[in-house]
Amino acid sequence: MTENHHNWPQALIEGFLRFRDNRFPSDDIKYLRLFAEGQKPKFLIVGCCDSRVDPALIFDCEPGELFVIRNVANLVPPNEERVGHHGTTAALEYGVCNLGVEHIVVLGHAHCGGIQNLLQTGVTANPDSFIDDWMRLVDSARISVERDYAAASAEQRQTACEQRAIMVSLENLLTFPWIAQRVAAGTLRLHGWYLDINQGQLLGYNAQTLQFEPL
C-alpha cells in the first residue's frame, strides 16, 4: 500500500539531501566509476541487523569496499536442501562466486538481541516465531555455554554465547563447496570477529589459542 507523501520519514529524506549536496559532489567520479565498472569489494561482512553496528561505519569504509550481509545475530546457515528462500546463502554465493571476495568476516557484537532471546527462551517459547526458528541455527552454542558457564553471570554467558555463535557460523561456511574449495586453495580467508561495544574493542578468533583476542 502506497503511503501519502505527508507520511514519508522526513529524517531519511533530509539525510539523503545532505548526502546529495555534501558527499556526492566530492565523490561523483568515484560513484560514476562504481556504476560504470561494477563493484569489486575484497571483503564480505556477515553482520547483525542491530542498528548500532553498521559495518561501513565501524570500519570507516567507502562505498564499494564492503559487500555486506545483515541478518538477526549475524548467522550463517549450513548448506541445506533447496527448500524455502535462502537470502543469506544467496548473498554469500554472489559475493564469493560472482564478486570473488578475498575475505569473509563474521562480525558478532556485544548485547546482541538475538542471542539474548536464544538464552532466555531456549528457542522453545514460541515455535511459530521466525526469530526462534532462525536462532535454532546456533542452539548448539547455547547448550555448550549453559554447560561450561553454569556458575557464570548472565552477562558472561551472553558474551560466551555471542562468541560461540560466531564459531558455529564459521563452521557452517565451510559446508559450502564453493567456499571450502577457495579456502583450501588459499584464495579466500574466513575470520570471526567480535565487537565489544562496552570496551570499544574489536576481537578476533585465534585458531591457535582458541580464544577471541584484541586485533
Image (cartoon, helix red, strand yellow):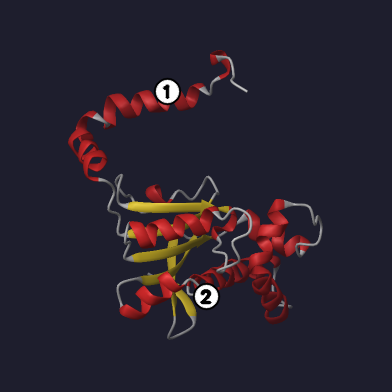
Q: Which element type, helix, strand or loop, lies under badge 1?
A: helix
Could you tell me the amino acid type at mark 2?
Answer: Glu
Q: Residue 65 at what x, y percent from top left?
A: 30, 51
Residue 16 sits above or below residue 111 on the image: above
Q: Quadrant of residue 184?
A: bottom left
- Residue beneath label 2, please? 171
Left or right: 94 in relation to 87 = left
Q: Are marks 2 and 1 in contact (CB under 8 Å)?
A: no
Question: Residue lying furthest bottom in this view?
Answer: 208
Comparing 64 with 52, the one in front is 64
Q: CA distance from mark 2 to mark 1?
A: 42 Å
Comparing 32 with 157, the one in front is 32
Left or right: 105 in relation to 146 = left
Residue 3 sits above or below residue 134 on the image: above
Q: Residue 62 at what x, y percent from top left?
A: 29, 46
- Camera sees residue 102: yes
Which residue shows up at 42% across the image and 52% down it? 68
- Mark drawn on residue 106: none
Query: Quadrant of the image for the N terminus?
Result: top right
Which residue shows up at 36% across the image and 23% down it? 17
- Camera sees residue 214: no
Comparing 145 with 83, the one in front is 83
Residues packed near mark 1 inside 10 Å, few (<14), some (14 to 19) or many (20 plus): few
- Residue beneath label 1, please? 14
Q: Which element type, helix, strand or loop, lies under badge 2?
A: helix
Compare marks 2 and 1 and give the one earlier in the sequence: 1
Which residue shows up at 67% across the image and 74% down it? 140
Q: Nearer the viewer, mark 2 or mark 1?
A: 2
